[in-house]
Image: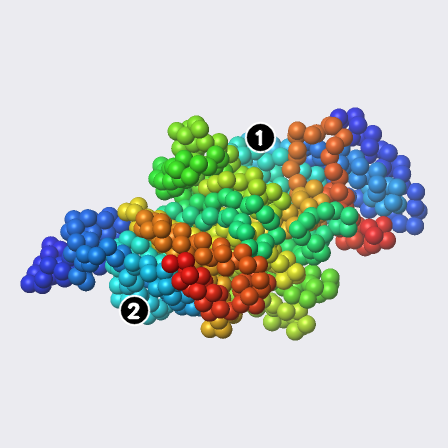
Amino acid sequence: MQGAMWQAVRAARAGRSYGTRAAIPATLIMGDGIGPEISEAVMKIFSHAGANIDWEPVEVTAQPPDEGRLLPPAIYESFNRTKIGLKGPLGTPIGKGHMSLNLAIRKEFDLYANVRPAISLPGVETIPYRGVDVVVIRENTEGEYSGIEHQVVPGVAQSIKLITRKASLRIAKFAFDFALQNDRKTVTAVHKANVMKKSDGLFLECCDEVSACYPKGINFRKETIDNVCLWLTQSPEKLDLMVLPNLYGDIVSDLCSGLVGGLGLTPSGNFGDEAAMFEAVHGTAPDIAGQDKANPTALLLSGVMMLRHLGMTREGN
Amino acid sequence: GKRTRLEGKGERERMNGGLLRAVRLGSRTGVARATSQWGYRGLSVSAPRCDDVHRVTLMPGDGIGPEIVSSVMGVFQAAKVPVEWSIHRPADGESTFKMDDALMSIARNQVCLKGPLHTKIGKTGDLSRNHVIRRSLNMFANVVPIKSRKGIPSRYDNVDFVIIRENTEGEYSGYEQHVTPGVVQSFKTITEWASLRIANYAFEYAVRNNRKKVTAIHKANIQKISDGEFLKACRAVAEKFPQIEYNEMIVDNMCMQLIMNPHQFEILLTPNLYGSISTNCGISLVGGPGVVPSATFGTRGDAIFEPGGRHVGYDIAGRDLANPLGMLFASVEMLRHLKLDQKANLIENSIDAVLSTGSKKSLTCDLGGNAKTSDFTEALIRRISESL
């Protein structure tokens, strides 16, 4: 597998033929399970499409606790330099005691905005939903995923959800900027502030403040997570762009993936102020790994998002 | 001691005072003690009825609540259902007396039919009235049957599963604090005993209702300790019921699976927030929030019946547009709980008959028809009167 990986990288580098633009270096995390085969497919397709990317493959596995950091040094070295990455699926063990590697990457590089467009693909049957076109923007660094948990006494567990003004303002601004740049008409802030008055209340307050700074052409509204789930499953055309805290974003983005055909077809991008990592959000599918069965569409569409982000719109299209 | 303040007052006042104090303090054991010790049902505030009429607490609620509740009252009258309503309207932001009265009434009657109660959104404000009811009376199990029904248009057919949701803790614990300006913490609490309680309830429900599979919903890959506690309890109970298949599913995957393949589920066993999300996804699979009933059960055997969506519907309130089906089906469940099966079947069969006409006049606007709430209710009452 190691040899095949390097062969693919050399082939991709050799495929570089357009001299008009220097190759853009990008970190490539192939991932586990079906990750390597779909990454190979993407590299092949990109080189044939003339997308001039200089891939830097990095292997990411959980480091032992005494190393201090969960992620290997190679990823820091590469990504801090390239600032652009494409990532395959990384396995998250349940109950192993360390943070998910996907989560660790987002936290370490402060990739605070997760963008998941869910757009019905022509030719893909997703009866009974057609013509779905929503974008989910999810705050990626705090909320319920702060990782702060403890056993108060045996039998009583507490998990802390952290909402900060800084992160909420940041994600709200990102969402409105995205709406402006991508011609989105309505931004919906999703919350559960009737129950979690202070935390989701703070999130809503920040969204309110940011919405006041943007032109009236972008409608802003606030809806509970219950209503949003209801609308998405009943009439997804009611929604356009949604901005959500971490957990609700995770749930709603997967719900939207279901509307358009599943995780195998949805792209995803994680954006920070300086860097961006695009990833396939499906699992590692170890049961079909190595059998030439995996669907590379999700990783490919994420790669297309990456090309558009880099300004390589022609190749992306 | 406790008695001294109430000395000189009558038996009724002493007893009511004890229960009232327990309810105000949110003391579950206090409520249980007060109502069991004094043989409460026999010493109710109003004179006990000796003619097999069931006294039921009725809370019309906010928004569309009063309209759909009056629909039920009209239907019950037409069907000659032996139920006497004890109506309570505890408004948000008012003093606690009205809420205390409502809680005492539910504790006394042990059955309640409830419309949706609105909770204001704001950083400060009273605790949600729904939450006060559930915590005071320990209403721990919310059961929402998601079932496709003939005559109700929906995107999916033959969906049939039940969501059993833990209703007292989890994200709804209500503990939040400002750590520093601009940083807020919200505490999600999961306890072993509440998780064991709901898991036991779910598996026993499965056995009673001939269900073969229970799926526990969690996010233990991220919230390892809290949802881990929930899963530990579910697994422990699953071992005691080897005849029921048990599996686990992460909440985001569950949402996706509900859309892509809802027929794989039989019982979804969820903590509080994930239950709310799965309920809202589930109800739109079978017709929407106007159609699905729900029941919430407490440790003492109290039961609260309400529409499954718990949506207040301020946008359509007062315009005779609300769909009364959710409340009607909830009242049918209530009649079955009261062992009034004949009346329950009468009403349910009449509803099926009205829906099966297939005309737009028998569906409210949320289901694509043009019937008003009152039109549908009148059609149903006519049907019931013909059957009697």
x and y, in percent, of residue A311 in the image: 81, 55
Q: Is residue A302 above or below residue A210?
A: above
Q: Mark 1 belongs to which amino acid?
A: Pro
Q: Residue at x 16, y 50 (%)?
A: B39
Instruction: Looking at the picture, tell me which residue is in the foreground, A218 or B207.
Output: B207
Q: Which residue is mark 2?
A: B95
Q: Residue at x 44, y 64 (%)?
A: B382
Helix or strand or loop: what does disc 1 sit on? loop
Helix or strand or loop: what does disc 2 sit on? loop
Query: Is residue A221 among the parts visible in the rendering?
Result: yes
B11 lies left or right of B102? left
- Pointer 1: residues within 10 angstroms few (<14), some, or many (20+)? few
The coloring applied to the image is rainbow
Q: Chain of mark 1?
A: A
Q: Residue at x 35, y 49 (%)?
A: B341
Please give the label number shown on residue A64: 1
A263 lies left or right of B91? right
Instruction: Looking at the picture, tell me which residue is in the foreground, A271 or B242.
Output: B242
Q: Chain of mark 2?
A: B
Please give the label number shown on residue A308: none
x and y, in percent, of residue B219 in the image: 52, 42
x and y, in percent, of residue B118 in the image: 43, 64
Count of picture labels: 2
Instruction: Looking at the picture, tell me which residue is in the foreground, A312 or A37.
Output: A37
Q: CA distance from mark 1 to mark 2?
A: 58 Å
Q: Mark 2 belongs to which amino acid?
A: Ser
Q: Are marks 1 and 2 in contact (CB under 8 Å)?
A: no
Query: Is residue B233 among the parts visible in the rendering?
Result: no
Q: Residue at x 81, y 39 (%)?
A: A43
